[in-house]
Image (cartoon, grey):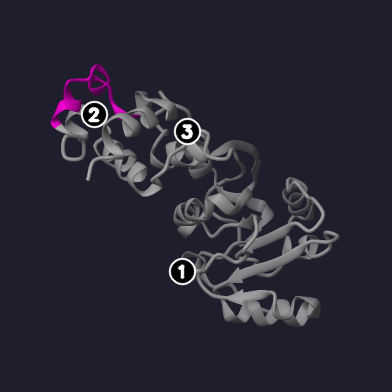
Amino acid sequence: MYTLKKSLGQHFLHDENVCQKIVAQLGVSKGINILEVGPGGGAITKYLKEIPDANYLAIEVDTEKVAYLEKTYPELKGKVITGDILKAQQPFSDSFSVIGNFPYNISSPILFKVLEWEPSVNEVIGMFQKEVALRVAAGPGSKTYGILSVLMQAFFKVEFLFEVHENCFTPPPKVKSGVLKFTNIHNPFEINDKRRFMILVKAAFNQRRKTLRNALKSVVPPSALADKIMDKRAEQLSVADFVGLYQQYFHEKQ
């Protein structure tokens, strides 16, 4: 068996219906490459490994869980990488899908990792703290709309699929959970420098109570500050508005 490690924020999903429902969200095709993030005790792993013609890999930071999975499912020997997802190299050279009951304490950094790999990521199915899931899926005008809402929605179609009750886990977390699906929309805005786009969006929301004129004055040229859009606050801008600012004033600024 294995032990729960509070330091790693471990809450293991035990509701089989929920496990199957999560796996069913994957758009399975012949030869699909699947990366499971944080398989833990194998709640959804046991279903993922049964997908026909799939190439499965997992990344798990807890060596005890890696040993448990390889002992319980000998066919996974060599397919569970011991390591930190946030420091991991891209696992497949071809396109792949990401799935996991993400550790809540690093769920936002995992999404930034997905953005790093975005050109190769077809879709992501992830379990999040419900509050975080709603934030990522939020649209402009909402108080929960923020940095990750804009960044993820610029590159992915984001869907809140369903809520998961805390009693579906051992031990039950103190929060409700939600499952999100991200489908790659192939950079429709043609953002050519993701890092600089991130700098702009982060600067806008880091002072979200201020107008963009105040929030962005250190990152855009002075000429941009006269633009009427600078009267607005970050939460009032759509993804397309942010891209417009980036393309007009920011991506060529050194």
Q: Mark 2 sits on what residue?
A: 212
Disc 1 residue type (three-letter): Lys
- Looking at the image, tell me whether mark 3 or mark 2 is earlier in sequence order: 3
Range of magenta residues:
222-234
Q: Mark number for residue 87?
A: 1
Residue 13 visible in this rendered orientation of the protein: no
Q: CA distance from mark 1 to mark 3?
A: 28 Å
Depth check: give the residue in front, 182 or 4. 182
Disc 3 residue type (three-letter): Phe
Quadrant of the image for the N terminus? bottom right
> Is 238 inside the magenta-drawn segment?
no
Disc 2 residue type (three-letter): Leu
**Residue 74: % across, % down:** 79, 80
Disc 3 and disc 2 in contact, CB within 8 angstroms: no
Depth check: give the residue in front, 69 or 83. 83
Q: Nearer the viewer, mark 3 or mark 2?
A: 3
Is the residue 246 above or below the residue 237 in the image?
below
Q: Quadrant of residue 245?
A: top left
> Is 225 inside the magenta-drawn segment?
yes
Q: Quadrant of residue 76?
A: bottom right
Residue at the extreme top of the image, as rendered: 228
**Residue 81: % across, % down:** 61, 75
Element type at mark 1: helix
Q: Mark 3 sits on what residue?
A: 189
In the image: residue 100, left or right of residue 223: right
Prevailing SS of the magenta stretch: helix
Which residue appears at 79% of the width and 65% of the height? Answer: 49
Q: Mark 2 Cα within 10 Å, few/some/many (few <14, many 20+)?
A: many
Element type at mark 2: helix
Q: CA distance from mark 1 to mark 2?
A: 33 Å
Element type at mark 3: loop
Q: Mark 3 Cα within 10 Å, few/some/many (few <14, many 20+)?
A: some
